[in-house]
């Protein structure tokens, strides 16, 4: 019911959790004082006397004192428990982020991105209840019955023992039922989110569905799935409810038993009115803390499940990264007998050798699945588990530290991530100290400044992932950011796919201009883009098929020439229109 | 904008929506009330037994003991029943409301979903429905239970002395209504600020992780980490304010409960002093008061969300009640395709005119391009051809017949559409193509894919046609998605193919691929190609330009 590992994580918060428990305990003590005062007053009355002014005053004083203490404890506990959970959440996220940065850009090799996302955002939030509510309640629900027992044992030992004995039945029943429910629950939670997604998806595609008259069928299937899911959920819930019911029966049955024993003692003359009243009023307090714990338990369960994944991430093994630095000012790239496999059997790259001289401009082309992107991932250090040799200047990439590699190589992919925030903030990621002029210059080069200056310039705001920009604009901004990074080697991995032809042209011209001063490697599925390269490498099935300049390759009349002409044929219509326009 | 409904009317309408579940709801309330009464009786009956014992009536006390045991067990079972009913209602409802909303949107689509804020609308509906579930399952019955249980308790107090009933009434109203309503106003701003802040922070965290690759590549992790801490601290500050307010509210509720328990005791003492009630009355009224706050205290957390819930209810009701822009035609003509035409059509969205005197002839086969700047009305023209809307003046005809007299089913049978972004469902590639014609055979699917030049690509996927598109993620480029959309259109076998900016997100090679496909089927289909791209002119047999509502 409790995870020592999790508590170990938050040593610093132990004191705070103890304070929450203590304040709840003080609150209980105030309660006992108050009930005792009321019992005393009623006893006087039961004896046929009237209350004296002094006694009345004492009763009121006890009431006011109890109210004040309870008020203070409530506010104090809620403040502290928030502080604990806030601190824990901050710390856990911080640790996770640091872990991921230590794992480096190869983190996605070892961990599933969707899982990290889930734990990082929702999972950590779910731990809030665990630390803020569940943990303090856990300790308090053990402390409260013991306190009451000690106190009531002076009043009636029999009743006190009976009440205390009933208490452990509650956690036992929770644990028993939870064992079964846990398995079922884990299975169906995924399906629930799935249903919400289906609904959303059907709404998004409703126009399409309606046009093809498929909306009725989708509607029927959606309802069917919802009904099936509902039945299963009811079964899971029934199981959870069983545990609640058992808890309730024990709690109320226990109190009733306590009350009955107390009254019997009165009948037998062993207990007076005030003692019995005290037991009647306090019997429920034996069980209430544990019942509350039970209700937090279901929520805390989610948090504990998340914590398992969290530990799995924190305990992921870190590979010793390279330690050496690239030394050449403008390094060349040389690949020799490079092989790489994602799964250990199928080779994505097979015995590949190629070289790009310092300051050269090379292109790598081939159909999808030929190994182009794998080569890019090896070159920028994302994939280090390769065989053969890949050198940047005189250094083997495997041995180069990620930091040094990042200072020498900039990669621009096809879906570069942009962050929510201003254009300025996005550019500063590449160079925090960049001046405004440098930023504007980079934006001018990618022809984005004309648009941005009609907006708010560098302070134009992007939504997360740049969703409010068009695909072409996003790619231009990503390119401007890459230009600010100003490294001797640039790697363009399909940097112009999925964007409109105007942006494609602009970006290509930037790449070509960059090529003069730096070592540039461009990976593209569109051969036309590669035409200006000094050298073109044609890949197929992870091996090098042909190499040479555009003219040489056309003259060879091999794979390249065939692909080039078939692509030209495809683009014929597009060009025809543009010609007519121009 | 329609008239806003009052809060009470919304509630009444919302409750009316769930008539089929009224029985279960009543049962849940009944079980809840009896359950609470059982719980209260454990202490009250215990006290009564104590009184009998003091009087020396041991026999009567014995009977009460039996009742005590029965009530304690009954409490557990009743609570079970109540919770089971509530959850039954909740899940039934979620499905029921989704069903109703989806049915309404099917009626309203496509026009209703083609507006500019489509994404907002969809996410709004989704979260609105979830809020409504909370309203039905966890708001209505607790309120009823609190009112009924308290009413029973008032009778109990009233039979001892009217003053007890008056004190209890004040106590219940204060705890169940006054404190929650007042405090809801008190924390609303902090609550909203914190919720918004928490939402924004989640967004930031998501953005941070999605961009981790870029951050690492540019070595920006330390700056990002600092920013993360800064934002976390800011959110915690807002959270701290809210939690402090909430802590005070909980404490105030607790103090009020204590206060009224004491008032009851003092009343009892005063009345006993005046000889109006006996000792039994004093004890039972005090114990009854102390142990009967459960149902009203449960209401204290509900009011915070009520304004949100009502707003959500209002939006959902609007959708359910909205009339479609065009009524489907069922008793008109069925038609075979023989070309289409727009004849001097004029159209405006509400007040803003889009098309004026637009005419175009669409022959049985061949490609007609509709070009023009964005916002000039190209897509609107296409939507009028599909009768998402009817023109304000002029008429749209198919085979010489006004669309307003053609059965909607027959019209759809003759048309297929490819939009700027093809919507793919989380299903296999084959199932996604099958959307075009659900009863098509595998050969027909393959045939359509071949026509759309996507067959070879599909064969390279791990499970071919049975590959799940969700598992592919980024493996499917936008160009490939568009060609799946084309295959879907080809499978439907409609004689008309309408394309709305099909290549605006594609590079020239992928654009070329799409246009090459169109070129191959130009002799078999009537193709309408809407595009702002000059390349459209290259492939079209004829193109017309729409500009500021005039065809030039």
Image (cartoon, rainbow, N blue to C red):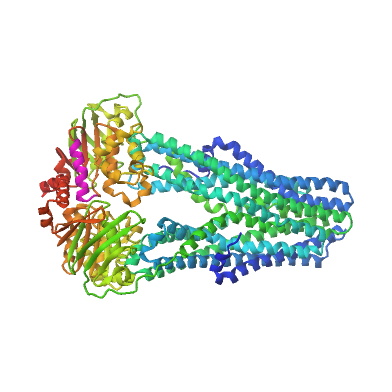
Q: Residue A122 appears at what percent x and percent y? A: 47, 57
Q: Is residue B437 above or below residue A284?
A: above
Query: In the image, is B34 to the left or to the right of B398?
Result: right
A401, A235: nearer the viewer: A401
A25, B147: nearer the viewer: A25
Query: In the image, is B461 to the left or to the right of B184?
Result: left
Q: Residue A369 appears at what percent x and percent y? A: 28, 52
A124, A436: nearer the viewer: A124
The magenta region covers: B506-521
B147, B456: nearer the viewer: B456
Q: Residue A342 appears at what percent x and percent y? A: 35, 57
Residue B277 appearing in the image: no
Q: Is residue B285 above or below residue B20?
A: below
Q: Residue A499 appears at what percent x and percent y? A: 24, 53
The number of discs equals 0
Quadrant for the N terminus of chain A, please. bottom right
- Residue at x-position 56% and y-position 37%: B21
* Quarter occupied by residue A277: bottom right
- Residue at x-position 38% and y-position 68%: B224
* Quarter occupied by residue B501: top left
Query: In the image, is B270 to the left or to the right of B524?
Result: right
Q: Main secondary structure of the magenta part?
A: helix
- Residue at x-position 44% and y-position 44%: B315
Query: In the image, is A348 to the left or to the right of B158?
Result: left
In reply to whether residue B407 is colored magenta, the answer given is no
Residue A405 appearing in the image: yes
Q: Is residue A437 above or below residue A476?
A: below
């Amino acid at each position: 019911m409790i995870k020592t590992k999790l508590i170990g994580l938050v040593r610093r918060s132990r004191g705070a959790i103890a304070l929450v428990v203590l304040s709840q305990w003080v609150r209980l003590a105030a309660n006992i004082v108050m009930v005792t005062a009321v019992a005393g007053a009623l006893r006087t009355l039961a004896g046929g006397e009237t209350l004296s002014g002094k006694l009345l005053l004492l009763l009121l004083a006890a009431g006011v004192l109890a109210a004040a203490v309870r008020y203070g404890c409530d506010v104090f506990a809620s403040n502290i428990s928030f502080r604990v959970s806030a601190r824990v959440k901050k710390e856990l996220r911080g640790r996770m982020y640091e872990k991921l940065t230590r794992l480096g850009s190869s983190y996605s090799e070892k961990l599933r991105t969707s899982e990290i996302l889930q734990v990082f955002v929702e999972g950590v939030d779910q731990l809030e209840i665990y630390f803020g509510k569940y943990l303090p309640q856990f300790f308090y629900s053990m402390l409260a019955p013991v306190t009451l027992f000690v106190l009531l044992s002076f009043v009636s030992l029999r009743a006190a023992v009976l009440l205390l004995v009933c208490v452990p039945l509650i956690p036992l029943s929770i644990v028993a039922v939870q064992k079964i429910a846990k398995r079922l629950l884990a299975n169906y939670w995924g399906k629930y989110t799935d249903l919400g997604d289906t609904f959303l998806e059907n709404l998004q595609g409703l126009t399409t569905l309606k046009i093809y008259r498929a909306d009725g069928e989708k509607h029927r299937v959606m309802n069917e799935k919802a009904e099936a899911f509902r039945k299963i959920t009811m079964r899971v819930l029934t199981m959870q409810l069983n545990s609640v019911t058992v808890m309730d029966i024990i709690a109320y049955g226990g109190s009733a038993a306590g009350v009955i024993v107390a009254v019997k003692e009165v009948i037998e003359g062993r207990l007076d009115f005030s003692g019995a009243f005290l037991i009647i009023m306090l019997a429920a307090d034996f069980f209430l803390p544990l019942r509350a714990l039970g209700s937090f338990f279901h929520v805390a369960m989610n948090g504990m499940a998340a914590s398992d994944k969290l530990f799995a991430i924190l305990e992921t093994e870190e590979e010793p990264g390279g330690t050496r630095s690239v030394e050449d000012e403008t390094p060349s790239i040389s690949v020799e007998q490079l092989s790489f496999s994602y799964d250990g059997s199928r080779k994505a790259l097979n015995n590949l050798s190629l070289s790009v001289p310092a300051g050269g401009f090379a292109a790598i082309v081939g159909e999808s699945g030929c190994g182009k992107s794998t080569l890019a991932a090896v070159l920028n250090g994302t994939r280090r588990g390769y065989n053969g040799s890949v050198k940047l200047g005189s250094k083997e990439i495997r041995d180069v530290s990620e930091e040094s590699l990042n200072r020498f190589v900039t990669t621009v992919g096809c879906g570069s991530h942009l962050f929510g925030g201003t254009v300025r903030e996005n550019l500063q990621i590449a160079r925090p100290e960049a001046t405004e002029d440098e930023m504007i210059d980079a934006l001018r080069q990618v022809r984005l400044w004309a648009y941005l200056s009609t907006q708010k310039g560098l302070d134009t705001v992007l939504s997360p992932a740049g969703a409010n920009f068009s695909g072409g604009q996003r790619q231009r901004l990503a390119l401007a950011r890459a230009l600010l990074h100003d490294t001797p080697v640039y790697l363009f991995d399909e940097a112009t796919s999925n964007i409109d032809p105007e942006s494609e042209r602009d970006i290509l011209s930037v790449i070509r201009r960059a090529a003069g001063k730096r070592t540039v490697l461009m990976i593209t599925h569109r051969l036309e883009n590669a035409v200006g390269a000094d050298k073109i490498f044609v890949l197929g099935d992870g091996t090098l098929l042909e190499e040479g300049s555009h003219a040489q390759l056309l003259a060879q009349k091999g794979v390249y020439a065939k692909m080039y002409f078939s692509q030209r044929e495809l683009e014929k219509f597009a060009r025809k229109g543009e010609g007519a326009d121009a | 904008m329609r008239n806003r409904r009052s809060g009470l009317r919304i509630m009444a309408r919302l409750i009316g929506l769930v008539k089929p579940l009224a029985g279960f709801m009543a049962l849940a309330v009944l079980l809840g009330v009896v359950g609470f009464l059982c719980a209260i009786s454990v202490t009250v009956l215990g006290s009564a037994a104590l009184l009998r014992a003091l009087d020396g009536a041991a026999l009567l006390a014995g009977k009460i003991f039996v009742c005590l045991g029965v009530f304690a067990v009954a409490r557990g079972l009743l609570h079970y029943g109540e919770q089971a009913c509530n959850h039954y209602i909740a899940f039934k409802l979620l499905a029921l409301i989704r069903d109703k909303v989806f049915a309404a949107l099917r009626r309203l689509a496509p026009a209703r979903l083609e507006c500019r804020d489509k994404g907002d609308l969809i996410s709004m509906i989704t979260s609105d429905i979830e809020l409504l579930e909370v309203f039905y399952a966890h708001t209505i019955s607790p309120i009823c239970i609190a009112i009924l249980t308290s009413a029973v308790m008032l009778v109990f107090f009233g039979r001892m002395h009217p003053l007890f009933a008056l004190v209890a009434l004040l106590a219940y109203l204060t705890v169940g209504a006054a404190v929650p309503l007042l405090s809801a106003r008190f924390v609303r701003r902090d609550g909203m600020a914190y919720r918004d802040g928490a939402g924004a922070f989640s967004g930031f965290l998501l953005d941070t992780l999605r961009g981790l690759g870029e951050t690492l590549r540019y070595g920006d992790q330390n700056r990002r980490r600092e920013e993360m801490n800064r934002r976390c601290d800011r959110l915690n500050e807002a959270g701290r304010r809210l939690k402090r307010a909430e802590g005070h509210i909980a404490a105030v509720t607790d103090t009020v409960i204590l206060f009224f328990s004491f008032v009851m005791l003092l009343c009892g003492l005063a009345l006993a002093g005046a000889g109006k009630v006996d000792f039994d009355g004093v004890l039972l009224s005090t114990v009854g008061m102390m142990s009967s706050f459960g149902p009203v205290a449960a209401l204290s957390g509900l009011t915070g969300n009520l304004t949100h819930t009502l707003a959500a209810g209002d939006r959902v009701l609007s959708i359910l009640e909205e009339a479609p822009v065009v009524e489907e035609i069922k008793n008109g003509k069925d038609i075979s395709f023989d070309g289409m035409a727009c004849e001097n059509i004029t159209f405006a969205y509400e007040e803003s005119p889009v098309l004026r005197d637009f005419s175009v002839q669409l022959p049985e086969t061949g490609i007609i391009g509709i070009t023009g700047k964005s916002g000039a009305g190209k897509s609107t023209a296409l939507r009028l051809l599909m009768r998402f809307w009817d023109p304000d003046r002029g008429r749209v005809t198919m085979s010489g017949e006004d669309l307003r007299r053609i059965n909607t089913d027959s019209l759809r049978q003759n048309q297929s559409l490819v939009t700027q972004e093809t919507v793919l469902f989380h299903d296999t590639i084959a199932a996604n193509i099958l959307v075009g014609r659900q009863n098509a055979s595998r050969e027909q699917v393959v045939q359509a894919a071949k026509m759309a030049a996507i067959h070879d690509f599909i064969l390279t996927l791990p499970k071919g046609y049975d590959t799940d598109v969700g598992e592919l993620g980024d493996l499917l480029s936008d160009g490939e998605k568009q060609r799946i959309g084309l295959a879907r259109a080809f499978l439907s076998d409609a004689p008309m193919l309408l394309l709305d900016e099909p290549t605006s997100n594609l590079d020239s090679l992928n654009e070329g691929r799409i246009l090459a496909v169109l070129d191959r089927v130009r002799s078999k289909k009537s193709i309408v190609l809407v595009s702002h791209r000059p390349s459209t002119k290259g492939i079209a047999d004829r193109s017309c330009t729409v500009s500021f509502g005039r065809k030039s």
